[in-house]
Amino acid sequence: MPPQEPAPAANGAAPAPAPAAAAAAAGGKRRKRGRWAAAAGVGALLVALLAVAVSSRSFPAASSSSRGGDCGCPGTRKYTGMVEDCCCDYETVDAINEEVLHPILQELVTLPFFRYFKVKLWCDCPFWPDDGMCRLRDCSVCECPENEFPEPFKKPYSGLSPDSMICQEGKPQATVDRTLDAKVFKGWIETDNPWTYDDETDNAEMTYVNLQLNPERYTGYTGDSARRIWDSVYKENCPKYPSEEMCQEKKALYKLISGLHSSISVHIAYDYLLDETANLWGHNLPLLYDRVLKYPERVQNLYFTYLFVLRAVTKAADYLEQAEYNTGNPEEDLKTQSLVKQLLYNPKLRSACPLPFDEAKLWQGENGPELKQEIQKQFRNISAIMDCVGCEKCRLWGKLQVLGLGTALKILFSVDGENHLNQSLQLQRNEVIALVNLLNRLSESVNFVHEKGPSIEDVIKQQSSSTVKPALN
């Protein structure tokens, strides 16, 4: 997906006007010096931010000093207290992500089961002609040859047929009590996700992609085509109503899309083509500040989306624990199973943040069912817009992360209650791959923002204080 477009004011603040008395006395030479000084100030800011950038090149673990330093004094944090509409605070999220979730997820997504994603790359935009243009070869996706992706992925899905899953709908008296059946996972199924647009059963148009060979990064996809994608997402399907008019459910949808958008912007800024001639890639911290850090709401929504997806993963823990992570490589498959269990049942996570998000508080009004259908339709439209992204690699990661978010919505809202979830939840293999990769993307973004955010904002503040001079009397 294309990068997050900042608000018009984000294009840069105008230089502070000179005091009236000084302006009256100034001549052409002083005005020229003022322009040189302003240019020098911008240059100094970029140099300072680049200096921060080169201090770390990988998604690092946040240092203890960012939480307060070695002296035991409390650190200065911009984001403290509870994450809005969630059940965990920022300090806990950062600590648990750094110590537990981020290391596990980083290893998990490199293993064969989570490395290969099935996607429909070539599809017509249902809303407007595809006129997107990418100016970099990094837009293209390397598809897997037939002999690369795991052999079990080529076999038909096992498990219950879709007919057997829906035949009892509306007839609870016909349902068999499965209390004694401890096996939640009943095989991978092939069925559509009610929250997303793509026909996941149409294997003829799907291709497997090795995600490790196609990282989410800057691609050069910008301009009107990229802006139109996000305009359509926000204005038509996810409008930000005035706070007094926005119900909790629509507010949650807006925050999820904004948080996903922020995460995409973080990854573009993290892995950016700094010098095309030299093929030099690195951190673009000015872009990170302009697209995300400058707007506290975007950072808050990133944390909200992270906790929302984490809640879906933990809610489906029994199902995910028993799932078959078979790729034909016994050693790697056992490692995958072990890491999944570590992710789901880590005691630090369970004690510090047992309920990342409380989905039970939604859809409670008398219009709950109708509201759910409306929001489900809006999200399906958002997933359909991914077919209009004019950059192949952006489309790949857009589809994966929207499917991951749709899977989280399916887990949290398509089945009521923990007991019913254990009896009724059925996921596609591709949904689980998308869900875990999305959680990893969000974990990386939270980690990078936590690591670099304070130092970037310190540079901005120092630069501002050194360039803005008090007026002379």
Image (cartoon, rainbow, N blue to C red):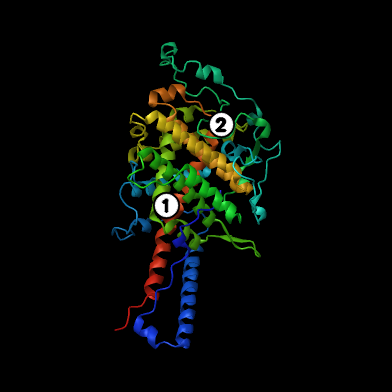
Query: Which of the two residues, 185 or 31, is positioned nearer the viewer here?
Result: 31
Question: Residue 441's spot in the image, x, y percent?
Answer: 50, 46
For residue 224, which quarter of the picture? bottom right
Residue lying at the far right of the rendered structure? 146
Please state if 368 lies on the left or on the right of 157 as rendered. Answer: left
Quadrant location, the C terminus: bottom left
Q: Secondary structure at mark 1?
A: helix
Q: Quadrant of residue 150?
A: top right
Residue type at mark 1: give it: Arg
Q: Which residue is mark 2?
A: 429
x, y (%) of residue 43?
Answer: 50, 73
Q: Callout 2 environment at 10 Å: few (<14), some (14 to 19), or many (20+)? A: many
Label 2 residue SS: helix
| Sequence-first tag of 2 and 1 | 1
Query: Residue shown at 49%/69% (left/top)?
Result: 46
> Nearer the viewer's eye, disc 2 or disc 1?
1
Query: How far is the residue under mark 2 from the one under mark 1?
Result: 31 Å
Q: Position of residue 333 (x, y in %)?
A: 57, 33
Residue 339 in view of the camera: no
**Residue 458 in the image: above or below residue 200:** below
The label on residue 230 is none
Residue located 50% across and 19% down the image:
166
From this viewpoint, is residue 223 visible? yes
| Residue indicated by mark 1 | 298
387 and 333: which one is in front? Answer: 387
What residue is drawn where x is 54% and y is 39%? 383
The amino acid type of the residue labelled 2 equals: Arg
Q: Are marks 2 and 1 in contact (CB under 8 Å)?
A: no
225 left or right of 285 in image: right
Q: Position of residue 367 (x, y in %)?
A: 36, 30
How dense is the environment of label 1, judged by Cα within 10 Å: few (below 14), some, or many (20 and up)? many
